[in-house]
Amino acid sequence: MRIGFIVNDVKTEEGKFTTSRLGQAAVNRGHEVWVMGVGDLAYDTDDMVRARATSVPKQKYKNSDTYTADLHGKNAVKRRITVDELDALVLRNVPSDDYLSRPWASTVAAEFARTAMRHGVIVLSDPNGLAKASSKMYFQLFPEEVRPRTLITRDRDEIKHFAKEEGTMVIKPLQGSGGASVFLVRKEDIPNLNQMIDAVSRDGFVIAQEYLKAAEVGDTRLFVMNGRPLRVKGKYAAFRRVRSGDDMRSNIHAGGQKATAEIDKTALQIAEIVRPKLVQDGMFLVGLDIVGDKLMEINVFSPGGLGSAQQFQKTNFSINVIEAIERKVQYMEYYGRNFDNVDMATL
């Protein structure tokens, strides 16, 4: 199998990243693996998508750190490849990371990938589905029963009214990730709300959201693959993120700590409720961030933390993700393109 991974920039990839773990697992299973950044893509005059891509020189790697070291090393294989000739293309770039510094890079990966699909490349996740999920507004399209009460606006008065109704709320930007510009607003903070709104709204719309008290003990990231919780030998690909000190954010790069997750009936019920839409939109590997009996977020762009799930569950889930891609490629080779997102999600 020839498989490609699109990331924001190859130079910034690290061994701990989920993409690197998937790349290592694919190489170890005998596949030809290419990694390319968003800016490495090109549409040539012969109507083919090509890219300046990087691969590794060895056929086996002990871990993702040594794999990534070779990806960046002097012996890395660099070649201009034809993306349309790949068997599978996995979109692992995060558009919100480019939203401010490289706005041109926010959407082009999905656009190039959609073009490559014309020539039979399996693209994961479906770029048409990802286009719908280009902002946190996508979250509002899922059933209301799993979402916190939410207002999305740029109007100060509407936000202040929502704050008075809720008593305690969270505000954050519609575009953004990693816990940046996220504020907890209590009743006593309302007199200072203007400054918070200014900080969040300078780059776009503001999300004002019901505060989930269960977040005080952290949240659980549960990986969902093909619409189903990723489970291997009875162990779920999941981990908990716990707040550090007084910081309300449990994001790992915002100071949160990792812990073992216990997946209960509530988490599985939430996953089942969102499953139909994830399948319909062709979402392959997704991270559900669960707080109590609600979803805090649905991560469809390059969900990270598969290594943390492996650490706590003592299971290499990356292998199972690559096996799922192999099944899709085999299905494609046997049946051709006579399938839709729902068909592919059963593999």
Image (spheres, helix red, strand yellow):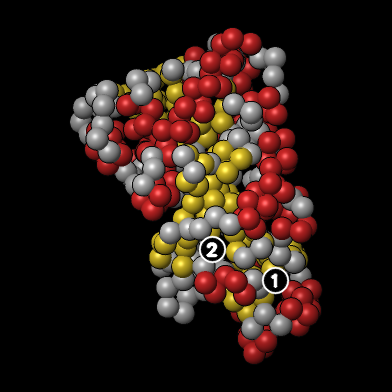
Write the residue at 56% across / 11% down.
333
What is the x, y in percent for residue 41? 48, 28
Q: Is mark 2 on a helix, strand or loop?
A: strand
Give me the disc on residue 210.
1
Amino acid type, residue under disc 1 in the picture: Glu
Answer with left or right where residue 344 lies relative to residue 162.
left
Q: Is label 1 in contact with label 2 (beta carbons under 8 Å)? A: no
Q: Residue 63 carries which label?
A: none
10 Å neighbourhood of mark 2: few (<14), some, or many (≥20)?
many
**In this rendering, the label closer to the viewer, 1 or 2:** 2
- Left or right placement of residue 22 versus residue 45 in this view: left
Q: In this view, does 275 lie above or below 205?
A: above
Where does label 2 land, which residue?
219
Q: Residue at x 41, y 33 (%)?
A: 319
| Front-most of residues 190 and 25 | 25
Residue under the point 71% across and 58% down: 146
Q: What residue type is labelled 2?
A: Asp
Q: Where is residue 116 in the image (x, y as percent from the top left)?
A: 58, 21
Is residue 24 depicted above or below 205 in this figure? above
Q: Position of residue 10 (x, y in %)?
A: 37, 37
